Image: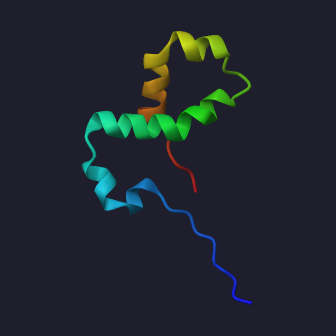
Amino acid sequence: QMQLEKFSLKEADIPMLKDLPQGLRVKLHQEIYMPVLMSANWMSEDLLELDEPLMLKLCDGVLREKV
């Protein structure tokens, strides 16, 4: 039986993602990282709802992939 080797694909490994318009990149990062923020025990749901611009900045500029 053949075993498939596990590997992680990073955003930097996909050249066309570098050419995405900023708005689309921000939306992509929101889709990737918002669930991480929402699952953080220290992050209140009220903060997530009240300060959406802050959450978008966190998703797009602060959080990064760790492999």
Q: Which residue is at 29% across, 57% downward?
A: 16
Q: Residue furthest front?
A: 1
- Res. 63 visible in picture: no
What colour scheme was applied to this rendering of the protein?
Answer: rainbow
Image spot of residue 50 (x, y percent): 54, 9
Determine whether 28 is above or below 11 in the image: above
Image spot of residue 48 (x, y percent): 58, 17
Image spot of residue 1 (x, y percent): 74, 90
- Res. 32 visible in picture: yes
- Specify the quadrant that holds the C terminus: bottom right
Determine whether 27 is above or below 54 in the image: below
Residue 21 lies left or right of residue 5; in this view the side is left
Q: Which residue is at 50% across, 13% downward?
A: 51
Residue 18 lies left or right of residue 8; in this view the side is left
Considering depth in this image, is 34 or 40 the residue closer to the camera? 34
Considering depth in this image, is 20 or 60 the residue closer to the camera? 20
Q: Residue furthest bottom?
A: 1
Q: Which residue is at 63% across, 11% downward?
A: 46
Q: Quadrant of residue 57?
A: top left
Image spot of residue 11 (x, y percent): 42, 54
Q: Quadrant of residue 38?
A: top right
Q: Quadrant of residue 21?
A: top left
Total labels: the figure holds 0
Q: Which residue is at 50% across, 37% downward?
A: 31
